[in-house]
Image (cartoon, grey):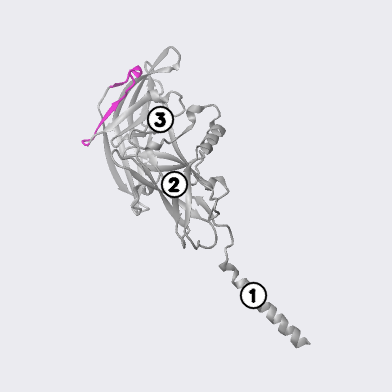
Amino acid sequence: MKKINITLLLFSLITIFSSCNDEWKDEQFENYISFKAPLSGEGIANIFIRYRDSEKTVFQQPLIVSGSTTISKDLNVKISVDPDTLNVLNYERFQNRDDFYYRILSDEYFSIPSSIVISGGQNTSLMDIDFTLKGIDMTEKWVLPLTIEDDLSGSYKANPRKHYRKALLRVNPFNDYSGTYSGTALKIAMEGYEEETPIVKSEIRSYVVDEKTIFFYAGNIDEERQDRRNYKVYVNFNETGGVTLSSNNPKMNFKVNKDASYTISEQMDAVRPYLLHRYITINNIDYQFTDYSMVPNVNINYLVSGSLILERQLNTQIPDEDQAIQW
């Protein structure tokens, strides 16, 4: 009897361990479909698009399949624009300050496929988004909100968590001169108070107009102002190192007092030899303008002088420009 019990025990143990050893072959989780679009502190995912006047730029948005195994068959995942999620985000973050709202990117500036195929044996795929951004007004904060649609046939499952099922892509076009400049060497003074301590902004953000032109807001005006679009200063860079500053709003009384110029210098990082530092310096900035709307019926004149400097860090080991720049 003891021999029979021992034999049965050994058989049971072998069966148990054999079944345990095969568990790893089975899917341990759900094969949910998700976007890879991590959110910033602003509740959106920043993407950077090379601006081109006459041709499209392709951005590849990753999709991933969760799980412990790869899928065995092709999945045809349906993608669509999702304005409702953006509307909820705007109200929850900004309430009635609609001048702060993210604006849904007009379909004249992009095109997306209605579906994307994730091939069997793979757990990722890239969705091509074609951008044509000529004429875009970067006074607004443009977002392309995407969602993964449910599949009625049940061939795939969209991730139930909204931050994975949704992709709120804030579109940031860039050219060779755009970015956030250091403003510590730029002095802003009220007319008549030039000898007083000037206003200095640590950072001045610039925005793309075309391949050779950017704009920033005059003086100490920034995105916080509801009427910011009235105070744009355009900066055009020419091939010979000259810079032209201008405005299209006559109410600003914009006047340039000195010809500006720019220089570009590059330096490899001393510690990380693959990292290139590129510096763009705008010299001899000297202009004046009128802030006519800050105080009703009162014109405030400002003098702005000094220089701006932009640093770009580029990883020379990465071939894709938008990913090589360390934003």
Residue identifier under label 2: 114
Q: Is residue 326 magenta?
A: no
Tell me the element at label 3.
loop
On the rendered image, what quadrant is the C terminus found in? top left
Disc 2 on helix, strand or loop?
loop
Q: Which residue is mark 1?
A: 17
Mark 2 and mark 1 in contact (Cβ < 8 Å)? no
The CA distance from mark 3 to mark 1 is 65 Å
Residue segment shown in magenta: 239-256
List x then y, in percent, for residue 233.
34, 27
Amino acid identity at mark 1: Phe
- Nearest to N terminus: mark 3 or mark 2: 2
Where does the image place residue 291, in percent across and percent down from the top left? 40, 19
Calculate the distance from the C-alpha at mark 3 to the C-alpha at mark 2: 29 Å
Please tell me in which quadrant of the rendered image residue 255 appears.
Answer: top left
For label 3, the residue is 139
Instruction: Confirm whether the magenta stretch covers residue 241.
Output: yes
Q: Nearer the viewer, mark 3 or mark 2?
A: 2
